[in-house]
Amino acid sequence: MDDGVLVRVARELGFLLPGRDRASGVRRLGFDPDATVGHVVQAAGVPLTEAGELLVDGRPVPATARAGPGSTVEVAAAPRPQPMPPGGFLLDVGLGALARRLRLLGLDAAWSADADDPDLARRAVAEQRVLLTQDRGLLKRRSLGRSGGALVRGARPDDQLADVLDRFAPVLAPLTRCTACGAPLEPVAKAEIAELLPEGTRRSYDEFSRCPSCGRVYWRGAHAGRIDALVRAARSGSRLGGTTEETDRGALRR
């Protein structure tokens, strides 16, 4: 009898396996008596953040269980939607454009251009955020557990946004956060910031908001139509499109 362990993953997780195993969704690993089921699943290529129910020879087991020689481990995909994290989202350095879109929709999305992997993992745990990343190795860090991170699908920022909204189904509050730093915006009287505005903006707009953290001033400018389309698509669950990397309202940094 073969004393290895067979790992069979749900169709949605097949892309995480090595190329030769993706079509079948099955990967065979050597048996390690010290390895938990969680270790086996991750050795197959699937971070535990992406795994749902785990079965060993047809029986539900926790990730801490152990599979015997000759066992079959079945891995379901993480269910959707998942609960929103109490602290919001934390995005890996490569997902800055996604962070901007999440903020446009009013979601708490922390992001830094120079955070390293240990810092990201520590911050996610300390602030009760879900770490969004496309780095499978980062998601395998023990401190994140099974619910502290999420693998973002998609190469384009709009596809990534659609994936995050599908996975967490958050309540949206469009145009209420600063797209630069993520802080909640506050209304500001036109008279208070009139000297900062270009002449054309002063003539054309009367309602403004300001970021109390970085001082950036916002109004519904030339990009309002594209933002409205983004919001409608997000709320309807339809495919996002027609936006640009710099989709934003009119904005001016003080």
Image (tube, rainbow, N blue to C red):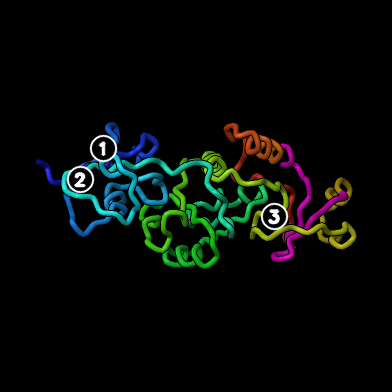
Q: How many marks?
A: 3
Main SS of residues in magenta: loop
Q: Kindly identify the amino acid type of the residue bearing the numbered disc 1.
A: Val
Q: Quadrant of the N terminus?
A: top left
**Do we see residue 114 in this rendering?**
no
Residue 236 in the image: state x and y as whole percent.
64, 33
Q: Quadrant of residue 180?
A: bottom right
> Are discs 3 and 2 less than 8 Å apart at CB?
no
Three-letter amino acid code of the residue under disc 3:
Arg
| Residue drawn where x is 69% and y is 55% of the image | 177
Residue occupying the point 13% across, 46% down = 3
Looking at the rendered structure, the secondary structure element under dot 2 is: strand
Q: Is residue 213 above or below residue 174?
A: below
Circle on res. 128: none
Alpha carbon distance from label 3 to label 1: 44 Å
Q: Quadrant of the C terminus?
A: bottom right
Q: Closer to the observer: label 1 or label 2?
A: 2
Tell me residue 163's x, y (percent).
Answer: 52, 41
Q: Dot 3: few (<14), some (14–19), or many (≥20) neighbours within 10 Å?
A: many
In which quarter of the view is residue 9 placed?
Answer: top left
Q: Earlier in the sequence, mark 3 or mark 2?
A: 2
Q: Which residue is mark 3?
A: 177
Q: Start and end of the magenta stretch? A: 206-225
Q: Nearer the viewer, mark 3 or mark 1?
A: 1
Q: Amino acid at mark 2?
A: Val
Mark 2 = which residue? 5
Q: Secondary structure at mark 1?
A: strand
Which residue does the numbered mark 1 point to in the structure image? 26
Q: Position of residue 68 (x, y in %)?
A: 19, 50
**Mark 3 vs 1, N-terminal side:** 1
49 to the left or right of 207: left
